[in-house]
Amino acid sequence: MIFPLSGEVLGKIKGKLTAKEIKQLKEHFFPLETIEEYFNNKTPYSNLISWLGRLNEPENIDLCNRVFSIIDDYLRLCDQHLLHTYYEYRLEIYWKNKDIDNAKIYAQKLIDLSDSVKTMPSIISHENKGYKRMIILLTKEKDFEGIINLCKQAKSEGWNGDWDKRIEDEKKKLEKGAKK
């Protein structure tokens, strides 16, 4: 799908960023005007999402969050595939920067969206990062029941993964914990 709002988004992004943030974008990436090319040339919005994914270094996380927050409202107009891609990028940025609270939010958003995108061949052919990351987070919290439930849900939706083995492993951990 093509992003539906043309160069209007560029103006909104520029209007909400400080001069320092615009300078940072120009110095480290490319001029903000280049974003307009994504809209004027009707380049798929996923390319813009990919570009924004480059803002994933710790020193850029605040800027990344600001740009993402500006385009969040526009994403509601996009199809589920693009929304899924966007959530994956945000999840990975927060994960890389050890922002557990936001990583958990975007892992859950991917899980919530997973049933509606599971039939898309480009997505179902790989793991759902939302399930993968949320299971890691729940493992750290020792929430074995939560992991079992997520594995059952992922399995029922048809996502790739060794769900039966993981469920059995988590059940053993539950039993071991109950014996203590």
Image (tube, helix red, strand yellow):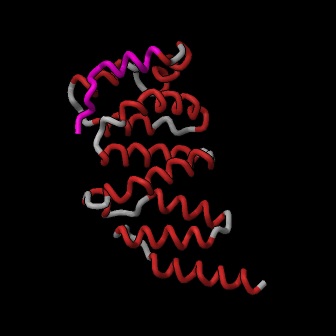
Horizontal side of residue 11 vs 144, given as left or right: left
Residue at x 21% of width, y 29% of height: 42
Quadrant of the snapshot with the C terminus: bottom right
Quadrant of the snapshot with the N terminus: top left
Instruction: Specify whether residue 3 is painted magenta.
Output: yes
Residue at x 52% of width, y 78% of height: 167
Residue 60 found in image quarter: top right
Residue at x 44% of width, y 39% of height: 53
The x and y percentages for residue 116 are: 32, 55
The x and y percentages for residue 104 are: 56, 51
Residue 139 found in image quarter: bottom right
Considering depth in this image, is 26 or 179 the residue closer to the camera?
179
Residue 83 found in image quarter: top left
Is 120 above or below relative to 96? below
Residue at x 39% of width, y 53% of height: 113
Considering depth in this image, is 164 or 23 the residue closer to the camera?
164
Is 58 above or below relative to 103? above
Horizontal side of residue 56 vs 174, given as left or right: left
The x and y percentages for residue 22 are: 49, 18
Q: Residue furthest left?
A: 41
Is 176 above or below relative to 52? below
The x and y percentages for residue 125 are: 31, 64
Considering depth in this image, is 156 or 101 the residue closer to the camera?
156
**In the rendered structure, which segment of residues is drawn in magenta?**
1-15
Instruction: Specify whether residue 19 is painted magenta.
Output: no
* Numbered circles on residues, count: 0
